[in-house]
Amino acid sequence: MRPKRYTRHWTVFLLSLLACGLGAFALWQAAGGPAQPASGSAPAKEELAAQRSSLLDQAAALARGYYYQEAIDLLEQAGPGLQNEQTAQAAESYRQAQQDLVLYEGTVYHIFFHSLIVYPELAFDDTGHPAEGYNMWMTTVSEFQKMLPLLLEKGFVLYDITELVETAEDGTVTPKPIYLPPGKKPLVLSVDDVSYYDYMAPDGFASRMVINDQGDVVTEVQAPDGTVYQTYEGDVQPILDQFVKEHPEFSWRGAKGVLAPTGYQGAFGYRITDLELYTPEEGQQMLEAVKAISQRLRETGWQIGCHSYTHNGYWRGDITMEELESDLTRWKELIGTYTGQTNILITPFGAHYSPDDPRYQYMIDQGFTILCPVQANMSTTFTGQGMIQNRLNLDGYTMLKHPERVSQHFFDPQLVLDGARPPL
Ligand SMILES: [Zn+2]
């Protein structure tokens, strides 16, 4: 049995393909569909050949992103004038690729980041927030950009964390089989604290996400000279979106990663939990922005996870049931209402909760069937009620203090480390 999954990403993917090439409808029309004007003659041979070549390109792009069935359907549903030996051969090759997928039984790798440092000279100048904290727990834009081709080269493919679990009607959670081309390895990626906190603003980070003229979610960044501009290079999310656009084979059917904001300073740079500081109109605009950004993120392969409301130190282990309840309830009401609800909980400080801990049970009862703490082994366990997946931080701390944790699976940190980092 081969998986034949249709996810929402595919629609967006195809739509974007159609937008930049000839539409399937236009192809069908040109191939002699009934909308052809009665007086029109059959399209010239060269024109048909050009349309066929565009169709083949679209199918190839779909197949590169592992949308094999969609590529086959596109070719086989094209007008009869367009189908020929070449399109049949292409369809056959995608059918073969589909049959060649193998059940993956190894580690599901999970790496995570915080918001990227855009201007190291500001983050490491030791004014504002101490440079050491950034040096330990953050990654710079240039480091992240260097990691991506190395991960691609190693055979990693971004995988949607929600596609790792199967939930039965009685709530039992089991692993969902993963089928990949031979040699490929699933990689889950997450970004913690995607809130763009006030304290980071003067230290060379993006300040919020915005949707640009092209409908893409990008970042707004303030340059050292004070200029504010929009860029695709201000954080993990737009950088990864652009990379996958160029390298669809780095993403299994459009999957990107998990973005996990807290709540105490809103989400994605919008202070939606401090609305009393703004006019009602401003407040409404911020809520609408978070909704629109979240919707666009989900359409483009991102999941949104919960990283708690408070990120309070009690999450390190001594959180009481009352604190837990209040924290998660506030996130769901004040953030989840606008970002969309989620079954992914990324614990603050990477804290672990044992399946027999009543607090774990409470998380499950609240719908958080996917729990993501931190541990370098990146192990995944199924508790019956949910999945616990450990993550590795690809930041200064790991790359400088424990380079072997990175090199044994991914790449030599020396190849990516930013020269602007002070010694740790
Ligand atoms: Zn955090």
Image (cartoon, helix red, strand yellow):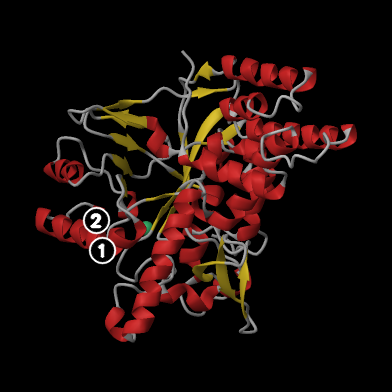
Q: Are marks 2 and 1 in contact (CB under 8 Å)?
A: yes
Left or right of 42 in this view: 321: left
| As drawn, 391 above or below 2 | below
Q: Is mark 1 within 8 Å of ligand 1?
A: no
Work out whether residue 416 can be spotted. no
Q: Nearer the viewer, residue 72 or 364?
A: 72
Task: Identify residue for label 1.
Answer: 312
Q: Amino acid at mark 2?
A: Trp
For the question of whether residue 382 can be seen, the reply is: yes
- The three-letter code of the residue at mark 1 reads Asn
Question: Callout 1 environment at 10 Å: few (<14), some (14 to 19), or many (20+)?
Answer: some
Q: Quadrant of ligand 1?
A: bottom left
* Residue positioned 64% across, 39% down in the render: 248
| Residue 393 position in % (x across, y down) | 47, 48
Q: In whole angstroms, how far apart are the C-alphas of marks 2 and 1? A: 6 Å
Q: Is residue 185 left or right of residue 382?
A: right
Q: Which residue is mark 2?
A: 315
- Label 2 sits on a secondary structure element that is helix
The residue at the point 17 percent across, 55 percent down is 324
Residue 74, horizontal then vertical, whole percent: 63, 30
| Circle on res. 67 | none
Q: Name the residue located 84 percent from the left edge and 32 percent from the top edge.
A: 49
